[in-house]
Image (cartoon, grey):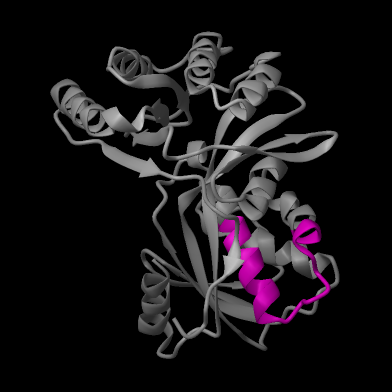
Amino acid sequence: MNDTAKGVFRDAFGFDPRVRYYAPGQITLARDQTAALLCGIDRGIVCAASARSDGMLRIVTESGIAAYHIDDTAYHGDWTDAVRRAAAALRHAGYPLTGADMAFSSKLPRDEGVGYTAALVTAAGGALRALYGLVPLSDEELVRLLSYSGDHRAIHSCMMARKNTAMLQSAHGCAYLPLASDRAAIVLLCTAFNGAADLADGDRLCTAARVLKDGDYPALGALMRATHRATQGPILRELNLLTEAAWATKGVYGARAIGGCTLNLVEPLYLNLFVKRMADFYEDMWDRQPRLMVVRPSDGAHRLNDNG
């Protein structure tokens, strides 16, 4: 993935980037109004960047190179809005950014259910920090600044995630809980449908954290099912059909809708069966193949080896 970002940058600008920075996607296992249980996943976004001295941001997009002044925070209605807001947040905090050339590559669908915008903002902000040598700017402070560009919980999880763990974020701080991929496979089924409603899990969050700490994945799956059924507001019929099909498949601990995806927790022994059944079900219903991703809890955002 990082080679793709480097290659996109070189093709667009004619030279190699100075830094590359990776930020993972993230998923929400459970949440309520005051806390959330999240984990980073091993799919994400890479930003490749080099500095400029003319106050301009040049961003490689699908239609070419888009150029903006570094202080431009106007809404343009595309994904570059998040990148420009990240740069502006650092500038407004007093950091001496003078411009950048930037290119991105992604293995995430453009869906907030997998933290697309948070990963984009974090990759851009992390690349600019590395590019300008902003050593005193800690991860926590960077998260605080970038949160003006997006959801604080998602950006914090994106930056601070740890491999094989879930993160419990609350007003009391952050705690890490084991999430073993050899005991529970996480499968994302990404659809062409837009959005499940916001979820309000109530006291299920505390229970989810406890059963995860105990390694009780069937109980966690049951909480996911209860969460889905208790969602406030409508869930698209298509997402309901997919979660019902998942629940009816052998080896599935639980499933729920997040954004335009379904999040499925599957016993590893039955992973291949689940993937085949859901792919067949989706194709039978809508005459096209779904995007199915088996993901693992991953480490948070970090700078990539510049020689790689």
Q: Nearer the viewer, residue 4 or 225?
A: 225
Figure check: 213 above or below 153? above
Which quarter of the rendering shows the N terminus?
bottom left
134 horizontally vs 245: left or right: right
The residue at 52%/10% (across/down) is 226
Which quarter of the rendering shows the C terminus?
bottom left
The residue at 35%/14% (across/down) is 247
Q: Nearer the viewer, residue 179 or 52?
A: 179
The residue at 60%/60% (across/down) is 301
Q: Quadrant of residue 169?
A: top right
The image position of residue 239, as x and y in percent, is 37, 20
Q: Is residue 14 magenta?
A: no
The image position of residue 180, as x and y in percent, is 50, 39
12 horizontally vs 20: left or right: left
Figure check: 88 above or below 291? below
The image position of residue 60, as x and y in percent, is 45, 71
Q: Is residue 136 magenta?
A: yes
The image position of residue 265, as x and y in percent, is 42, 27
Magenta stretch: give its range: 120-142
Figure check: 90 above or below 75? below
Q: Quadrant of residue 125?
A: bottom right
227 horizontally vs 35: left or right: left
Q: Nearer the viewer, residue 12 or 265?
A: 265
The residue at 34%/42% (across/down) is 293
